[in-house]
Amino acid sequence: MRKAPFRIVAPLAVASLCVALSVPASGQLVLGQYENEAPLATWNVFGASTAAGLGLGGIRLSRAWDASVASTNPALLTALPRSSGSLTGAYVITALYRFSAVNTGVLSSASNFSTGYLALESGSFSYRFGDWAAAFTAGLLESYQRPGIDQSYSAQGLVRYALRLEQTGFLRGYTLALARRFGRRLSFGAGLNLVRGNLDRVLVEEWPVEGITIADTRAERFEGLFLNAGLHLALSRGLSASLAVRAPYSKKSDAESLLRYTASGGDTDIRIEAEARNSYRQPLVVGAGLDSRWSEAWSAAAEIAYFGWSRYEVRYFDEPLPRPFRDVITAAAGVEYSLKGRLGARPARFPIRLGLAYDPQPMDNAHSSYLSLAFGLGLRLGSLAADLGGRVGRESGSGNSLKTGRVALSVSWFSDDR
Amino acid sequence: MKRSPKRTAVIILPVALFLALVPALLEAAADPADIVSFDRRHFESRGLVRDGLDLLYEKDGRVYAVVTPEDIASLVSRGVAFTIETARLAPSAGRTASAAGGLNGAFHSAYELDTELRLLADAHPQLVRLQEIGTSLEGRPIQALKISDNPGLDEGEPAILFLGCHHAREWISVEIPLLLARHLLENYALDPEVRSLVDRGEIWIVPLVNPDGLEYSIHVYRYWRKNRRANSDGTFGVDLNRNYGYQWGYDNVGSSPVPGSAVYRGTAPFSEPETEAVRRLFLSRDFRAMVSFHSFSQLILYPWGYVDLPTGKEAELSTLAHTMSALMAAVRGAVYVPGRASAALYTTNGDTADWTFGVSGVPSFTVELPPEDTAGGGFFNAEAEIEAIFRENLPAMLYLTNYAFLSSPDGGIRPRLPGTLRRSPPRLPLIKRIDRDLPSAITMNQ
């Protein structure tokens, strides 16, 4: 019952307290999007993305941009030139409001936080031999980072209380895929995927004058294995359809935790250490798309993807954690106009892209979704290609109007002109 | 087409292998083992070491062993007290609830506690009923154990109530009432004092009043105190030990009207489903005493908390508190300082003890468990200390239980020294006795 006398519930350096929120009639906390294991920006991650696909709204399973399609729809590998390679880098920035101890009762802010990263997101390579094609791709699939919180309270020239909260982590995927063309119209491909990553979280509180420290540290090392497959069917000369599936799988982690209380005054050092094998049951993903090219310059693509989040299960340090999630369907569509021109003495093409994306999040107790506008530019020069794509989105449903943005640059090489 | 011998072997070999394995698989499936624990003293006194059980280890005064269903049947037939630990210690063997190795170590989470309470109820159906007395804000059950000789019947017996974990960060306050429940059930057949208490009354134990807060304390922020009410201003939590109805909101010193305060009292008395659950339970039975466990400071507090004035039963409450303190100190020297809550600590209004005493006049205590101060750990206790803290509280809990069961409904009290029990003389049915020429030595029973 006793209040800790030195526990300072004082205004934090970041912002003032008490954001007026409309809350559900039940009066319960609605965490929203950001559970600890939630990927940054969106839960709905399906394979690697390219700058070109990003510019078209996030098209990734109905058009063969480069070898990275191995992680979404490997059937498209047969549409690539004999050999290809690509690299994609991205800058991502995302807003959050409620996560961990922030805006859930311990720390409060008057506005959203932002966090992001700049990274070499993916690299891929493919080779086509006859009716067969093979590819390898490696990519950054998910980021688990959160804004770092570093707060302190001082009085009379002394730091009386300090709190530090950090979470970092990511998930990388590696895909080895094989595809085969059957006749002139149909292709089928399948891939074996390995994911590896980590998630590290630290929350430290200190009362320097009293010599007391509480540290709560957790570390997870992820791994998972799953299959993906796809079909690609040329319906006509300018129209094709695609279907892709990612099998459900368990992302498992070897986890460690240490909860420690030290007090120099009493020579006290109390520890609770734990190890566990955590699991996060990832959903079935099924996507379908259409790609249409009705002239040399104009083309468009559209996709939907189903994420079976209602079966999402988390087992965390030997306990099932509640995750009331629902199935969602994402959608993306975009149009491309390819400008012909020359770069120096060489003929070149300059694709210009515009797209839209709808990305509902799976939380059942807060129907939140992102609506994004996408844009892109490209250059096709012989066997080289470069693409720049961007997407800005705004979320609705959580009451926090979270924004997200992404800019990507892809550089590709193909063995012959496309 | 004639099949080649090689192809035949390829077909037969895996089938044969499977058939060879099937009996082993079936045998394993048909012979599940459980992990049980015994109180070490009883294990030795009953000579269980000669039973040839598959012993695992000894920890914190308990001996752990792997047993077969046949072993269990034998133990039950001989009246040996044991506790099934399988779900707690062997996560793969059914519903998982490890209170030894998760984020909370040997302390129980809401999930683990719920599992353990169900196991206790299943293992001792003749002595205990598990009752869900309410549901928390986030939909978690608030569970109560009723321990009595005929738990399924309403015998109108006196009752005592032990509560734990109004405040989320006080993890030790879950363990002590839980261990009391286990002790009563395991020792009913072996300990005459326990048997007497269980036979004479109802011992109600609610180890976890604030499951939502506890889960937040375990998973998000260790020092969380309140429940998980989303307040209208964007803050979270109501202090459940300021939400009871007696002198609720008496002043803004003993509680706060500010939602962001650690001692926020809520929008109204019993506005929270957790306290409402306790209220309904307390008013439904003839409770003669109440103990609410908290931490830290090593104190035994009694009303009033809302104002620094004695109640009309100051002498009784003080005597009880001092007696319990002495019993605790006798175990290993830990001093729990007894005192009136408002004087010993600070004023609190809307707390549990003030309410139960205010509405019923029964002895009501807040026991602040160890350590004494933040230098000793504050709201942290070493896992190795759980059993020891329970052992030092046990005599006091048994003493108070006995005291409660001896008290009369109108509040008249017959104080007893610890360790002495005296049964009330039996009550004869109403008979009109007609005697003639009675010898002078015969006396009539009452």
Image (spheres, coloured by chain):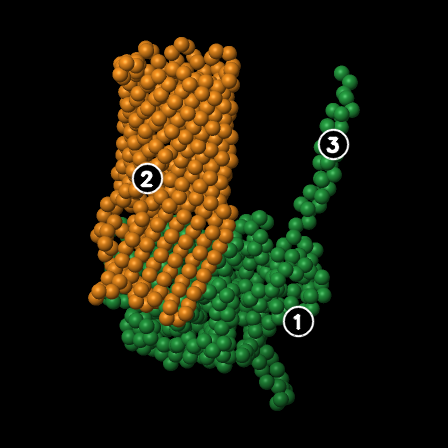
Judging by colour alone, the chain drawn in orange in this rendered image is A
Q: Label 1, secondary structure: give it.
A: helix
Which chain contains the residue that carries disc 2?
A
Residue type at mark 1?
A: Ser
- Please identify which colour was used for chain B in the image: green
Figure quadrant of the C terminus of chain B: bottom right
Marks 1/2: CA–CA distance: 66 Å
Q: Residue at x 31, y 48 (%)?
A: A148
Residue flagged by tag 2: what amino acid is it? Tyr
Disc 1, disc 2: CB below 8 Å? no
Q: Chain of mark 3?
A: B
Check the image and report above or below for A85 versus B248. Answer: above
Res A206 label: none
For the image shown, how many numbered marks are present on the structure? 3
Residue type, numbered disc 3: Leu
Left or right side of A208 for A226? right
Task: Tell me which corner region of the image, top left, top right, bottom left or bottom right, holds residue A237.
Answer: top left
Residue A117 tag number: 2
Helix, strand or loop for disc 2: strand
Provide the residue designation for mark 3: B13
Q: Is residue A288 visible?
A: no
Secondary structure at badge 3 equals helix
Residue A202 percent across, percent down from the top left: 38, 52
Question: Where's the N terminus of chain B, which quadrant?
Answer: top right
Report the residue at 42% width, 60% height from top: A260
Q: Which residue, given by chain and number where applicable, does mark 1 sit on?
A: B45
Given the current orientation, which residue lies at the most extreme front position? A345
The residue at 31%/35% (across/down) is A91
